[in-house]
Structure formats: structure tokens, C-alpha cells
Image (cartoon, rainbow, N blue to C red):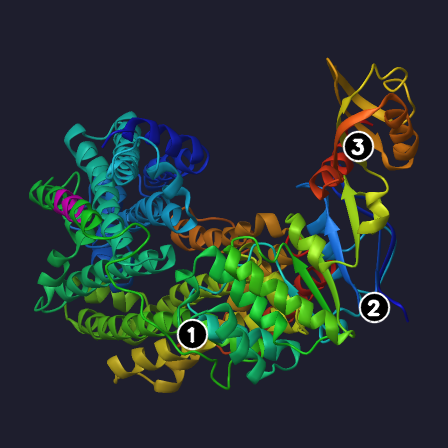
Amino acid sequence: MTEAIDATGLVKRFGKVTALDGLDLHVRTGEVHGFLGPNGAGKTTTIRILLGLSRHNGGTVSLLGGDPWSEATELHKRLAYVPGDVTLWPALTGGEVIDLLGRLRGGLDTTRKAELLERFQLDPRKKGRTYSKGNRQKVALIAALASDVELLILDEPTSGLDPLMEEVFREVVLEEKKRGDRTVLLSSHILAEVEVLCDRLTIIREGRTVETGTLADMRHLTRTTIQAELAGPPDGLATLAGVHDFQLDHDRVRFDVDTDALEPALRKLVAVGVKSLVSQPPSLEELFLRQYQKDERR
Amino acid sequence: MTGTGRLIRLILRRDRVVLPLWVVLLGLVPAGYVASFEGLFPTEAERIDYAQASAGNAGFVTLYGPLHGSSLGELVAWRAGFQPVLVALCALLMVVRHTRTDEEAGRTELIGAAAVGRHAQLAAALITTCAASVLLGAVVTAAMLGQGLPAAGSLAFGAEMALAGCVFAGVGAVTAQLTSSARGARTIALIVLAAAYVLRVGGDVSALGDGSLAWLSRLSPIGWVQHLFPYGVNDWWPALLALAVTVVTTGVAGLLLTRRDFGGGLLPARLGPASAPAGLGTPLGLAWRLHRGLLLGWVVGFALLGLVFGGVGGSVLDIASENSGLGEIFARLGGSEALVDSYFAGIAGIVGLIAACYAVQATLRLRDEEQTGHAEATLSTAVSRYAWAGAHLFFSLLGPAVVLAVEGVAVALAYPQGDFGEILGGTLVQLPAVWVLAALAVVAFGLLPRLSAVAWAPPALCLLILLVGQTLQLDQWLLDISPFTHTPKLPGGDLSPTPLITLTVVAAALTAVGILGVRRRNIPD
């Protein structure tokens, strides 16, 4: 089995609202897979279907080789989940919740728990109602990471964490990744986090998958920004296929260019004569903004 | 206090359905009593007969309070004697909902950061609740005047209801400052209300006998408002007392508010254990942690209730044995033995209904768990939905058995003249009826999760049938709707197993339907 999560054409309706409209999600065993999309795109709905909490109306889905709805209890022994908005039982302490969730899952590595408590600097003796959002998040993260499971499903796990703790989270996930046998589905809005951690990613919008692949694959789909000071007038450059947002100010030009049109554009510049050149590689932000917006125009 | 006006409008907007519902419903119920009394006892002689028999009936006095006259107005006001408790309940829940519940949920923080005074939210909640109570009183007064009853009495009758609401709005305001959780605030306020009711019952029933403890009901706000005795003496001193307590509690709540941190209570949060005890690792272990406080509270409450009801039994025996005109009436009803039996059987029915409220409350913990996201966390582990729901139902089905047994034992201890087995048995036979109402709550949770609160409708309906069933002489089929109509009336009656088995089977079938619904639906829904 090579796919930990295999969802094809997933459809989920809530009354008249269609939350998922033919979503595809394929996560290979052993990889860290980024799961991205604007708010309301259907990330949490997808995760709830994967956890057997919601039943899908169409399409096929398999999780760790089983049916997430009918085999939920058995499958859950092999996975751990961190919800995006962690709520704790108000009267239970953080330490009690970590132990409880671990035991309900079928076991907890106590040495690992102690180590994670130390690294995330969490006081486990406080009652659930007194924790801040970030600390509630840590409780769920430690409970999940201290369980010896094949699959981690993390729904915006670092929301509310401070930058130091985000860094600890990244280190821990990278360690997990090195082990090679753990699969992680990471839903996130933090692009730097995705860039560092994820092997492949899936971008969804309005319940549909709009892009899936490695980050390198996706960079090809984006544009480089070029600023140059030229020796003469840049004839024909503005109309060249693949050049966008062309601006000319005396001898200075600024334009965006598709990756596959980069070479002809540069030839054109060289032919005119270049006094200075600044090239900005496609940033992740731009990549996501374009993917998020692409659908909007449709 | 800046912004109070706007916050009042916000409360009115949020409560636009619930508020008119209880104000109008509770305001109009007494008008129904007028018609039914006129129909049942058209002549004064009949009313006097009925009043004499009722005034000495400890069961009636327990439920409605003392009766000192036989005019139509006095009978109606007496018959509505349980209503101040209901008004008080609505008022305290409303105040806590608009203060501590909001604060716990974080909404107050949002409002507090705007140009709103520190006391604005508390003031808005209190003003709205007291205004609603006064309006309810005005509805009562207007309805009574409309039925042609005397003005002074109608005014006192309305004031009785309004003041009950105001006093417990104040109580709710104080308890909302004490704990950091809305649930804790509600629990303390409910304990105060229960204590007020028990004190009134103790005092009034004692007054039927030797009167040595009659002063107890003068300690109770519920006692005060009843001691206005509308249409009778129309006594106004208790009204001043109730008003004073409202002012004092309001002041205390305002003072406490300035003495505490936002989000905190006066009782500080302490550190707990760093790791879970051995028992906390299964669905049942978790359910025990979530239900034990509730169970303990109800056990204590039922023990007290049992001691009061058992103690009252002694007074009932005294009255029935007295060689008076009253004694003759009771003799015609079947003698002192039968009277005491029917008292305990009646009490058992009431206690069963209260236990059903516990069962519904415990069952709806499932919905709480779902709405707070705890169910999602639990079900994403290797816990099946059956195990999760089953663990909670273990407490909502067996918890009532425990509290009923405790109540039965407490009654028997406080009334040693009685037959221990019959008294305990009379209480425990209510259990299948309790289970039916609990099972209906499971059905609501499984099939209509968003409307889970309808699970309170069956107990409310049973209460209505219990309160008005006999006065209005309803048809038998209407009385039969309540499962409590079918339980054997012990002591005194026959212990026939058929209704018990039937009720249990119905409850089991309904529970199964509800659980299947839970298995099939989305969580959270």
C-alpha cells in the first residue's frame, strides 16, 4: 500500500450547501502532505470525513487501507488528530487530557510525553479552562505526538502558538519525517511552515482540488518578477506571450513573466542592452494568492 | 454603566422568543385556574369544603403552600403556589445566561473592549430580567382583573410573581460572580432556590402540626412572596423584605464584580495533577469524571428532599388521626392509613418526575460534549460511538436509580413508622417511567441533534399533567400520556409488574432508536 489517504471525487452536502464538490486528495505513505485552501474551502469537512465523524455523499475514500466510516474505531488506533480549535474539558488538567487521549487511542509513550512537555514548555497541572488558546493547542499536539501512530492529521496545529513554539513544532515534525514511516496530513495557512515541512501539497478551493504536487512542480506554474534598466526602447517585449503587467518608466521596465516564457523575454532584454537587472523568484505567497484567486475569477 | 441601554436591546434581541414565552405562559396560567375552580366548585359551600380538605393536606401544602381562606381568589392564588418557583427559575437562568455564560464564552470580552462600562452587562441583565418579572406580574394582575377578581388581591398576586423573579435575579447575579464557569454559577443559584423551597415546605408543613418549625418558611424568599396571601390578608411586609433582598443582592453582585478579574471567579482556580489517575483512560472513566459532580449534587438534593418528605409524613399522620372535623373528612377518604399511603405514593410520583429531570440533564451532556468539540476529540481516538454514548447513558440511566434509592431510604429514615420496603419500593417503581423520559432525550439527541432541547418538553408535559390534571379533570387518555400515570401507586396500591415491564421495554426500544441515530449522523451536527 503506497497511499495513506486516497480520496477521489469526494462530495459532501449539508442540506442545500455543497461543502465538497468532487475533491481529490492523495497522500503517500511516509510523506508530509500540506493541505491548503482559503477559509471555508472544505479542509475541516474533508478531515472530518477522514475521521469518520461525517459521512460523505459521493466519491470514494480510503484511509490507511480501510473505510473511514465503518472501520473508524479500528483505524483510529493507528492515527492521531489535532483539531484546529482545541477545546479541553474545563475540569481536567492538561496532563490528564494528554494521558486520557493517549489511552483512548490505545497507548502513550510516557518518556516521549515528558520530553514533549519539556520542549513545548507546558505546565500540565493547570485546569483546561485556564489555558490560553496556544496552550490548549500544545495539549492536543503533545497528546498526538506522544502516541506511536502511523498517521498524524493536523488541522492548523500551530494557530495560537508563539514563533518559538512554532519552531519547536517544526523541529518535532522534521524528526518524525526522518523516521520515514509516519505520514502527516498538515492543514495550514503558514506558508513558511508548509515550505519547510511538506513534501507535496494539495490546494483546494470551494470544495474542489485546484492543484496538487510538489512545491517545485508548482513553482513552474508561477511567475518571476523582472526589473531592468535598458539601453534602448524594449520593442515587442510588452506583447510577448507570457509577459504580464508590463510597466515602462523612461528606460526602466518592470514586468512579470511566466516561467516557460523566461528565456525568450531575457533574450529580448539582452538584444536591447541591459544596464542593470533585478530578478525576483516566485514567492510562495504569490503562488498561493494566485491559486486561491484563480478559482474566484472562474 | 455606559452602554447599558444598547446591551438591554441586545438581550431583548437574543431572547426575543424565550422571554415572551415564559412571561406570557406563566402570566396566563392562573387565569386557567379561575375558570376551572368556577366550574368545579360553583357554590361557596363547595369551595369551603374543598378548601378545608386541602388546607390540611400535607401533600398539597408541600406543593402549593398554606391555604387560609376559601374565596375564589384565595383558592386560585394558592393553587398557583408552585409558580413563584418557576418564575424564580426562569429569572436566575436568564441572569446567569446573560452574564457568566457570555463571559465564559468570551463574548463579554468583545463587548467589554468597546465603550461599555464595567457594570453595564450586569445592569442590563438585571434590568431586563426584573422588568420581565414585573411584566409577568402585570399580566397576572390584568388577567385576574379581567376575570372580575378584587383589585387589591390581584395586585398582590401579580406582585408575588414579580418579586419571586426579582429576588432570584439578584441571587443569580451574585452566584455569577462567584465561579468562573456558568455551570457552577447555575448550580449554586439552583441550590439556593431549592433550599428556599425546602425551607418553605418545612415551615408550612410544620404549621399544620405543632408549628414548632413554622418559622422556617419565614427564612425563605419563596415563603415571603407566598405570605402576601393575595385576596386574603393582602399582607405587604413580605414584599418589602423581598424588595430589600433584591436591592442588597444587586449591590453585592456589583461590588463583587469590581473585586474580581475578568473571566475569573472569587474562588481561585487551583493546580491539579500532572498526569491522569489509572481510572481515567476509558470512555466510562471519562464519563465518571464528567458526571460525578452532577450525580453527587443530585444525591445530596434527593437525600434532603427525602428527609423533608419523610418528616412531613409524621405531620400527615397527626392530622389524619386528630379527632376533628378534618379527621372525619379523611376517614371518609379511607382512614388515616390510606391517607398516609396516598401521601407517600403521591410524593413518589413527584420525586420520580424530578429524577427524570436529572436523567434528561445527564443525557443532554452528550449534546454538550458534541457542541464543545469534546466529542470530536474523543471520537477521533479508538472509541466507538456506541462506547461513547453508552458511557454517558450509563450515568443518565443508572444515576436516577441511585438518587431515587437515596431518596427512598431518606424518607424511610425520617418516617420510621412506615414500612421500609414499601416506601423504598414506591420510589423505585418510578424508575421505568424515568427511563422513558431519558430515552426520549436520547431519541432527540440521536435524530434531532440541533433541537435536543425538546428533550425537556416531555418532563414539562408530565409536570403540567401532574399540576393541572386533577384540577381540570382531564380525560384519562390525556393523563395516560405521562408514563408516571402508569407506575404502581405504592405504598397502598398493587405492585403489578406489567406496567413496569411495558415501560422498560418502551424505554429500551426508544434508546435503541436514539443510539442508531447517533451512529448514523454527522458529529458535530
Task: Identify the residue shown where x is 50% and y is 63%.
Answer: A88
Mark 2 neighbour density, 10 Å: few (under 14) some (14–19) many (20 or more): many
Report the residue marked by disc 1: B292
CA gap, disc 3 to disc 2? 30 Å
The residue singled out by tag 2 in the image is A29
Residue B224 at x, y = what percent? Answer: 15, 50
| Residue A294 - label | 3
Camera-near label (3 vs 1) is 3
If you read the primary sequence from the N terminus, does the residue marked by circle 3 or circle 2 appear first? Answer: 2
Amino acid type, label 3: Lys
Q: Chain of mark 3?
A: A
Residue drawn at the location 12% of the way across and 46% of the way down: B248
Nearest the camera: A243 or A218?
Answer: A243
Q: Secondary structure at mark 3?
A: helix
Chief SS of the magenta region:
helix
Q: How many marks?
A: 3
Q: Is residue B427 above or below residue B357?
A: below
Nearer to us: label 2 or label 1: 2
Q: Quadrant of the N terminus of chain B?
A: top left
> What chain is tagged by disc 1?
B
Q: Which residues are magenta?
A: B245-252
